[in-house]
Image (spheres, rainbow, N blue to C red):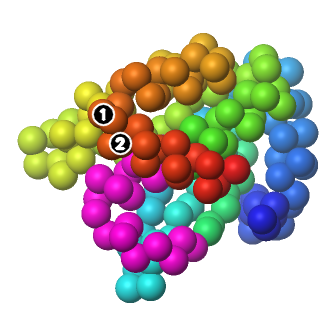
Amino acid sequence: MNNLWATGKGYEVEFNDVLLEIKCHVSLGGDVFIGTDSMPRIDGCIFASAICLHGGSGQSGGRYFYKRTVDRNKNLRSLRHRITCEVGRSIALAIRVAESNPAARVEIHIDIGATPLSKTRDLKDDLRTVNKGIRKGVKQTMHTVTKGLKKDMAKEAIKGLTRYT
């Protein structure tokens, strides 16, 4: 697995260096925000995951790191499947951050719309517990995710999680 991430300025960094940066940021009282987005392609899907650091004492602005990966699975055309994989990847990242930095306050951003025009609004209730669960720790997160998702979505989230870690 390629362990290289990019900084906001485009420099490549090892994931362990990102974890060290997170540790420093957390020691200053900062929060960690994690999210993943996707773009379907003819030959599969591109996923972009981001780790954003914001709100540390004495810090202005924030820092972010991102990683793009290509999944050649052509079954990722379904919006429901892609969103589930996005959430699974974000959870996997959040778990790695929380294990490395137990004091970190981690929030997962999920691309779910609430307006009547949003194509993802039906997923809102199924995925609502994820943000709450990750703050309570890794074990609670896994329990909350599998309990809060419908069975098929839980299986997909766990599959995405194991593929990513």
Q: Regarding mark 2 in the picture, which secondary structure is present there?
A: helix
Residue 26, placed above or below residue 94 = above
Task: List x then y, in percent, for residue 2.
Answer: 79, 67
Judge whether residue 18 can be spotted in this image.
yes
Task: List x then y, in percent, for residue 120.
Answer: 24, 47
Which amino acid type is marked by label 1? Lys
Task: List x then y, in percent, for residue 63.
Answer: 72, 45
Q: Which residue is mark 2?
A: 153
**Region in magenta:** 70-87
Judge whether residue 59 can be spotted in this image.
no
Side of 26 where 151 appears, left or right: left
Q: Regarding mark 1 in the picture, which secondary structure is present there?
A: loop
Viewer-nearest residue: 105 or 153: 153
Q: Residue at x 61, y 68 (%)?
A: 69
Q: Residues within 10 Å of mark 2 (few under 14, many from 20)?
A: many
- Which label was assigned to residue 150? 1
For residue 63: magenta? Answer: no
Residue 123, placed above or below residue 10 = above
Which amino acid type is marked by label 2? Met
Side of 88 where 9 appears, left or right: right
Task: List x then y, in percent, for residue 20.
Answer: 90, 39
Q: Quadrant of residue 164?
A: bottom right
For residue 78: magenta? Answer: yes
Is there a contact, CB below 8 Å, between mark 2 and mark 1? yes
- Which label was assigned to residue 42? none
Q: Residue at x 37, y 24 (%)?
A: 148
Q: Residue at x 83, y 31 (%)?
A: 100
Q: Residue at x 30, y 33 (%)?
A: 150
Side of 34 where 113 appears, left or right: left
* Mark 2 → mark 1, Cα distance in angstroms: 5 Å
